[in-house]
Image: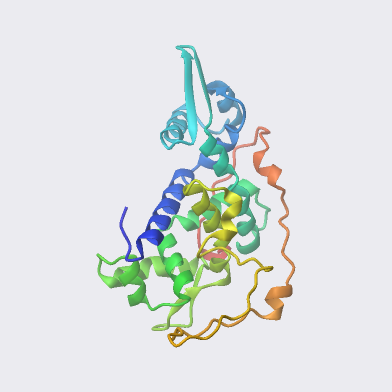
């Protein structure tokens, strides 16, 4: 995986999150993980829950999840083989409601309501764009940056104009905003709202509890009960302009409740063959 120009800790964090995204983003992987979230099952039992997948599609995907350490194959005899989730796989499932909640709030509402799983799949499609996590990470850390500055950090070993295609895609997806040509780039409200998602993925990838996402050093949310009184001014005070305090509207705006419940993600009723995923980007983003 390409190394960015970020500090080693941040670079490793992005690499772990990117790897986690690539484990679950391939088509059907989320559905297969949910189908495996039961006591160990035989292959035929799993296939019955995913009737729209042929054996030639399902078996390689289960094998890839086993290789990734998310699923476990147990062979008792030549005719008795079961599959189930590892502890890491079960821990990863806790991230899915966080992803679905972000999609419910920030993605454009289609004419027909989408299931929570489809919301998760659409969000994952955006986050696995080329260079997307690194660009979003840098903009979160720096608040805004020029294309050249972004390229110097995100793709230090490549020509700097190569940053424009992924930047344009993130703008089309509604995660990055700019005032116009030559103006700096910054996170949109939707991009900034990914804090819970990136925080949860980072905690999982680092082997820490997912519910500690609010403690992430970059994407976390400060504890409102903590003492926020300004520190004493010192002679080497930072020359960076202080960030603007949040407006009253942001502080008092009630949180939007999703139309689904966490348990909806883990229902194993046999579904009909899902429609093709909505094209990523465009009007829906």
Give the total of numbered labels: 0
On screen, residue 185 versus residue 101, left or right, reads left
Which quadrant, please, contains the C terminus? bottom right
- In the image, residue 201 sits, relative to residue 66, either above or below, namely below
Q: In terms of depth relative to the viewer, which is nearer, 194 or 219?
A: 219
On screen, residue 106 versus residue 170, left or right, reads right
What is the x, y in percent for residue 188?
Answer: 54, 72
The type of colouring in the image is rainbow
What is the x, y in percent for residue 81?
Answer: 50, 18
For residue 42, which quarter of the picture? top right
What is the x, y in percent for residue 132?
Answer: 43, 61
Whether residue 5 is visible here, answered yes or no, is yes
Query: At 67% from the left edge and 58% from the top edge, which residue is drawn?
Result: 111
For residue 15, which quarter of the picture? bottom left
- In the image, residue 34 sits, relative to residue 167, either above or below, namely above
Q: In terms of depth relative to the viewer, which is nearer, 21 or 108?
A: 21
Q: In terms of depth relative to the viewer, which is nearer, 68 or 241?
A: 241
Query: At 63% from the left edge and 49% from the top edge, which residue is drawn?
Result: 97
- In the image, residue 218 sits, relative to residue 46, either above or below, namely below
What is the x, y in percent for residue 243?
Answer: 54, 81
On screen, residue 12 versus residue 259, left or right, reads left
Whether residue 131 is visible here, answered yes or no, is no
Query: At 54% from the left edge and 57% from the top edge, which residue is drawn?
Result: 199
């Amino acid at each position: 995986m390409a190394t960015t120009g970020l500090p080693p800790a941040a670079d490793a964090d992005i690499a772990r999150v990117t790897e986690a995204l690539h484990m679950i983003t391939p088509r059907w992987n989320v559905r297969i993980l949910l189908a495996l979230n039961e006591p160990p099952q035989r292959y035929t039992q799993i296939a019955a829950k995913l009737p729209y997948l042929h054996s030639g599609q399902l078996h390689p995907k289960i094998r890839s999840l086993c290789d990734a350490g998310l699923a476990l194959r147990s062979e008792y005899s030549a005719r008795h083989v079961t599959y189930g989730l590892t502890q890491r796989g079960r821990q990863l499932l806790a991230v899915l409601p966080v992803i679905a909640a972000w999609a419910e709030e920030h993605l454009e509402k289609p004419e027909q309501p989408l299931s929570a799983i489809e919301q998760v799949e659409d969000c994952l499609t955006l986050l696995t764009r080329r260079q997307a996590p690194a660009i979003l990470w840098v903009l979160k850390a720096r608040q805004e940056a020029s294309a050249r500055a972004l390229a110097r950090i995100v793709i230090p070993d490549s020509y700097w104009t190569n940053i424009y295609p992924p930047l344009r895609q993130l703008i089309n997806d509604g995660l990055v905003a700019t005032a116009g040509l030559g103006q700096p780039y910054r996170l949109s409200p939707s991009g900034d709202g990914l804090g819970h998602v990136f925080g949860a993925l980072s905690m999982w990838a680092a082997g820490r509890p997912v519910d500690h996402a609010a403690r992430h050093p970059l994407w976390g949310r400060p504890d409102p009960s903590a003492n926020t009184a300004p520190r004493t001014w010192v002679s080497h005070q930072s020359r960076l302009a202080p960030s603007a305090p949040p407006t009253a509207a942001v502080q008092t705006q009630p949180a939007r409740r999703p139309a689904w419940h966490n348990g909806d993600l883990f229902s194993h009723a046999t579904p009909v063959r899902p429609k093709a995923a909505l094209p990523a980007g465009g009007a829906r983003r």
